[in-house]
Image (spheres, rainbow, N blue to C red):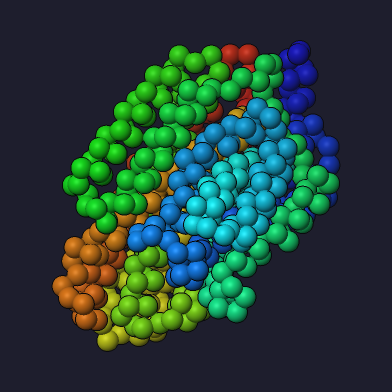
Amino acid sequence: MSRASRNNRTSQATDVGSQGLADRTGSTPDPRRWLALTLLVAAFFMVIVDSQIVMLALPAIESELGFAAGGIQWVMSAYLLSFGGLLMFGGRTADLLGGRRMFLLGTALFGVASVLCGLAWTDEVLITARVVQGVAAAVMTPTAMAVLMHTFAEGPERNKALGIWTGIGAFGATAALLIGGPITDGLGWEWIFYINVPVVAAVLIFGPRLLKETPVRAGRRRFDPAGAITITAAIALLVYAVSEAPIVGWGSGQTVWMLIAAAVLLVVFTVIESKSQAPLIPLRIFRSPTVVGGNILMIIVAMAVYGGALITSLYAQQVLGYSAVKFGLSTAIYALMSIIGANVSARLVAKVGYKPIAIVGMTLLSVGLLLLTQIDPNGGYWSDLFFGLVIFGSGIGSTNVAASIASLTGAKPEESGLVSGINNAVFQIGAALGIAIASSVAFAYTTGTDAAGLNDGFQAGFLATAIFAMVGLVTALLLLLSRKPAQPPVAAGDGASAEAQKVHVPAGH
C-alpha cells in the first residue's frame, strides 16, 4: 500500500473515531448499531442473572434432587469454574473463527443447557448441564464484547456503549436477587433456567441480521491446545482454591497445594506461549502499560465490589433480619447508582480520559466501603446502609468503565476477542478472591452468634474490602498516570504503521 493510500485511510479512521463508527472503511455509521448493542447487552444480562439467581433456589433444588451433604455447592461451582476457566479460550475463538459466529453458537449452547438444567432429573444431570452452561457463557461473554468493539470504534460512542454494558451487568446482579425468590416460590426452581429461553430465541432470530462479523486472523487458523489446557487448568484451580479457602482454611493442605499447582501451571503456560507459533495469548500484549494496568485494576475492582456486596448481603439478612426480597429491593440503590455512574463516566471519558475517572471511581469505592464499616447491630437501612451504598454504587460504575477502557485500549481488531477474554477472566478471578478473603476476615473477627457478635465480623469484612479499594486507588495513580502514551504493540506484518494506529486511542489516553 502506498504512503498516500495509508494517509487517506488514517484520515478516514480519524473521522470514524469521532463518530463512534465501527466500519473501518469510512462509510456512514450503521443505523442499527444501537439495536445490535441492545441484543448484546440482553445476552450479557442473561449470563449475569444466571450466575446469581441460582443462589436463591439452592434449598429447593437440594430438597427435590436429593444432593449429598455439601454437594449442593457444585450447582454454583460447576458453572463458575467452567465459565472462569475457559474465558480466554472463548475469547480467542472470536479472533480465529469470527466473533458473531461464536457468539451465536455460544448463545444456542447456553439455551440448550438451560433447558437441560430445568429438566434435570438427578443431581448429576444438573451439575453436568451447569458445566455446559459455563462453557457457553465463556464463549458468549468475550465474543459479545468483541462484537461490541467492532461495532463501535474507539472513541466517545464505544465509551458510551461500554458504560451501558457495565450498568447492565450491575443491574443484572440485583435483578437476580429481586426475581429469584418469587420465581422459585411461585413457579418452581426449574423456571430460573427456563426464563433464559426467550432471550436466547431473540438473540438467535435477530442476531444474524443486526450483528457484524468481527475480523479474523489472516492465514492458517491454528489453535494452541497446550496453552488452552494449561491456562484453563490454572484458572480453574485458582478459582476453586480461593472459593474453598474460607471453608477448609487458607493454610490447609488443599488450599496450599492448589495454589502452588496453579502457579506452576501459569509458569508452564508462559513457557508454552513463548515458544508457540500460534500462541493462545501472544505475550507481547502485556508490553502495553494500559493493558497490564487496566487488568490489574479490574482484578482489584472485582475484589472490592464482590467482597463488599457479599458482606452487605450478610449484614442485611443476618443482623437486620431482611428477607431475600427485601434485601434485593433495599440494595437496588447501589445498582441504580452503578448504572448512573457508568453512563456519566462514559461521557466524561471523552473529555478528560479514563485515568481521572479511574482515580475518582476508586476514591468513591474507598469512601463508600469505609462508611459501611460503621454498621451497628441495632442499626437500620437509612442510618447504616443507604449513604454508603450510594457512594459505593457510584464507584462501581466509574471504576468498571475506566478499567474496561484501559484494558481494551489499542487492541488490534483481530485480537479483540482475546483481550476481551482476558478482561473477563481477571474479573472472575478478582470476584472469587474478594468473596473468599472478605468472608474469611468476617468469620475470623466474628465474636458471637448474636447480632453484636456477627456485626463485629461484618465490620472487619467491610474494612478488608475498603483496603482493596484503597490499593486500587494507589494502582490507578501508579499504573494509569504514566505521562507517555502507551501504544499497542505492533507485530511484524501487521501492515499498519504506528502513526495509523494512534488514531484509534480514546481521548485522554
Tell whether 125 sits left or right of 377.
right
Q: In which quarter of the image is residue 49?
A: bottom right
Identify the residue at horizontal 32%, vertical 45% (top origin): 241
Horizontally, is 238 left or right of 173 in the view? left
- From the top left corner, tell me how far across and down residue 234 is, in percent: 39, 35
Residue 14 visible in this rendered orientation of the protein: no
Number of marks present in the image shown: 0
Q: Position of residue 262 (x, y in %)?
A: 33, 34
Q: Nearer the viewer, residue 402 or 375?
A: 375
Residue beneath the point at 46% across and 77% down: 324
Which percent across, then down, holds residue 150? Answer: 69, 39
Identify which residue is drawn at 69% across, 19% down.
Answer: 218
Residue 189 figure quarter: bottom right
Image check: 131 left or right of 313? right
* Residue at 54% across, 34% down: 89
Q: Position of residue 323 (x, y in %)?
A: 43, 81
Using the image as rendered, state which of residue 303 and residue 231 is in the foreground: 231
Left or right, 151 with respect to 81, comes to right
Which quadrant of the figure contains the N terminus? Answer: top right
Residue 23 appears anywhere in the view: yes
The residue lying furthest to the left in this view is: 447
Residue closest to the eye, 154 or 44: 44
Whether residue 459 is situated above or below residue 354 in the rendered picture: below
